[in-house]
Image (cartoon, helix red, strand yellow):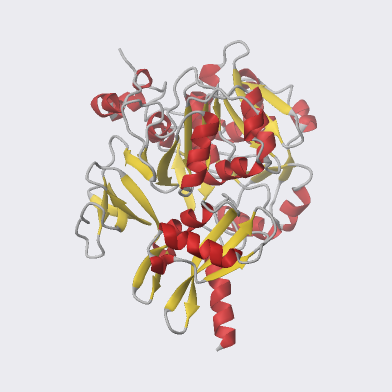
Amino acid sequence: MNRLTDFTSYADAQKHYSKGGLWALFDGSRERFSIAHECIDRHVKGDNVALHVAHSDGGDEIVTFEEISRRSSQIAHFLRSQGVGKGDRVAIMIDPSLAFYCALFGVIKAGAVAVPMFSLFGPDGIRLRVGDCKPEVFFTNAEKAPEAVEGGAKNVVVVDQDFLAKLDDLPATFEWNTSGSDLAVLQYTSGTTRALPAAVEHSHQSIVTLMVAALYATGIRPGDRFFCPSSPAWGHGLWHGTFAPLALGVSTGTFSGKFDPVRLLKALQDFRVTNLTAAATHYRMMRNSGQAENFTYCFNKLSFTGEPIDSETASYVERTFGTKVRSMYGTTEIGVIIANYPGAGDLEVRDGAMGKAVPGVEVAVLRADGTFAAPGETGELMVKKRGEWFPTKDLGRVDEDGYFYHGGRADDVIISAGWTIGAVEVEDAILSHPAVAECGVIGAPDAVRGLVVKAYIILKSKETPGLVTEIQDHVRARLARHEYPRQIEFVKELPKTPAGKVNRKILRDQEAKKFEAAE
């Protein structure tokens, strides 16, 4: 009997997809199910490699399914000895490494709820999350332990080689006892460290639904050599970069430590990666490094998420890596709902399009009054859940062939002198200028127009005379004449969310304060 992983075309995805087909990819049932078993224990066979970790210091770490299985079982026994039971929260703030993955799957085996935390959080960010989820144990490394304590964490445990060695006498297997509906992961969406974002609860069987994204958004198939440089503290790195490939027995790779695009490029070459999923920012940084041409690649599938990729970077990626980079769209709360089906030779990849709805999901663009927008008309992207339309809080449009296009966050729209302007489109035009490395566009308060388009720009080199006018004219030539940035500020860095997106809210807030102070 064919499995869903046997099909790669768009036509076959529509023809053969079923929820039963998703469940057939796993051993478990709704009554008895464990992410740890599905991702790790059932793939233990000889020296099968589960993970390649590229450390920022140049070192490579190779971890087998067997080692994660054995050591995660020992951590599960340790947690039980500490009184941690089913449903208890356990925080994990460790960079990708053997320690992180053993702790992650050990918590899940024990029936507790894993709470990944970004390793760059300071005491304030830790305090907010600890106060919210109240973990029974807080796993971290020696460097972050003092900050965890300062942030109010209890039972702080440093997971290093010495800790793992002390567990060697514990059994190498663990009898887990969880159902599909039991909670497995509590994950905070990306946001600033001082404002507590939403905490999304994921059950063990959430990984079954995840396979829709694995099959059609990142295109994972047995035999791939996969890689995702996003931190597993966030949804992309944990679900798409870790759980999805491991559940299919596919080796995956990731980046650990301070991000360096050249170090990433070397890892992609050395690990002979065939399937890469990354944030749009990662691709842009690889392009801006000027070093991508110095390495060789084995790619046949590329995907991105997080925010739209600018057209110049998309063209560069295709020229340099030999294949188009394909978009996927979704959120931590709703999962992936639109994709460009990597590996599907019968689906055209249209410039700027996010792709088409994934199987089993109904997506539409609605007007403010709840009616369906016409093809090409901008409205809010909505997904049908339990018979009702659920808002994504993102704008978009759909063409006559069912391809969706992103229009930015609903609160990123700029209304200037009655004109509606999308920050994403302006950013894309600015990024196509050869002097620009990065940019963020917002509506800045203006006494006459209400808002005007303002661009914060990071240059590739020093500012030259007349560059502001040159960039403005460059945008005018590509967009409607009223959409050019009336204000341009050159900056050394842009505020970003921990997931790497430009944090336009911070830019809007600081402009609002300037405007209020000037009145």
Towards the viewer: 363 or 374: 374
Tell me the residue at 56%/58% (across/down).
439
- Residue 170 in percent (x, y) is at 70, 23
In the image, what residue occupies the spot 28% across and 49% down? 398
Number of labels in the image equals 0
**Which picture quadrant has residue 267?**
top right
x and y, in percent, of residue 313 in the image: 52, 43
Q: Nearer the viewer, residue 7 or 119?
A: 7
Q: Nearer the viewer, residue 286 or 336?
A: 286
Q: Is residue 405 visible?
A: yes
Residue 212, position in %: x, y? 37, 33
Residue at image position (22%, 45%) is 400
Is residue 177 visible from the viewing direction of this image?
no
What residue is drawn where x is 40% and y is 60%?
Answer: 479
Percent position of residue 263, x then y:
69, 35
Q: Please say if 464 is above or below 212.
A: below
Question: Which quadrant holds residue 344?
Answer: top left
> Which residue is at the far bottom?
519
Residue placed most toward the observer, 113 or 348: 348
241 relative position to 358: left or right: right
